[in-house]
Image (cartoon, grey):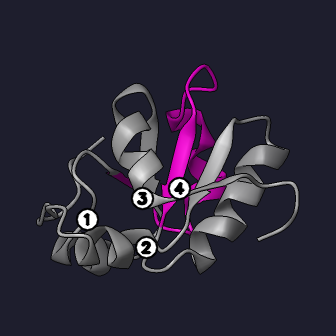
Amino acid sequence: MTSRTPEIDIDQLDRRARDAHVVDVREVGEFAAGHVPGASSVPMSQLANRLGELEKSRPVYVVCASGNRSAAMADLLVAAGFDAYSVAGGTSAWSRSGRPLETGAPRAS
């Protein structure tokens, strides 16, 4: 993560997710196996081409498996003018905390 990208933990995500857009940047198979409830699937390789799907008026919380991919993609969003945050620990930390995961393929846009 760079110094310009804010990071939040899973407790903060749990409190703030209702008022934000949660974007999971893992591959579709990883997303289908288990993701933060309500998250949208936008794989890392597609994010730059799908920025128009995100609202700049709401914060964007970027999640991956552990926080590495999400940090890089949060940097990309910040550079594009979004209020973006990387979720430290990612879906792994969410699951380890005992919070529920949703399963299944992404919903069609």
Residue 99 rendering spot, x and y as whole percentages? 19, 62
**Of pointers 1 and 4, the one earlier in the residue sequence:** 1
Which amino acid type corresponds to the residue marked 1 in the rendered image? His
Q: Which residues are magenta?
A: 40-63
Which amino acid type corresponds to the residue marked 4 in the rendered image? Val
Which amino acid type corresponds to the residue marked 2 in the rendered image? Arg
The mark found on residue 35 in the picture is: 1
Q: Is residue 81 above or below residue 58?
A: below
**Of pointers 4 and 3, the one earlier in the residue sequence:** 3
- Residue 18 or residue 26, whichever sits in front: 18
Closer mark to the observer between disc 4 and disc 3: 3
Residue 44 rendering spot, x and y as whole percentages? 55, 69
Q: Which of the 4 quarters of the picture holds residue 48?
A: bottom right
The mark found on residue 62 in the picture is: 4
> Answer yes or no: do the residues labelled 1 and 2 have beta carbons within 8 Å?
yes
- Residue 56 or residue 37, whichever sits in front: 37
Q: CA distance from mark 1 to mark 4?
A: 12 Å
Q: Residue at x 71, y 69 (%)?
A: 72
Label 3 SS: helix
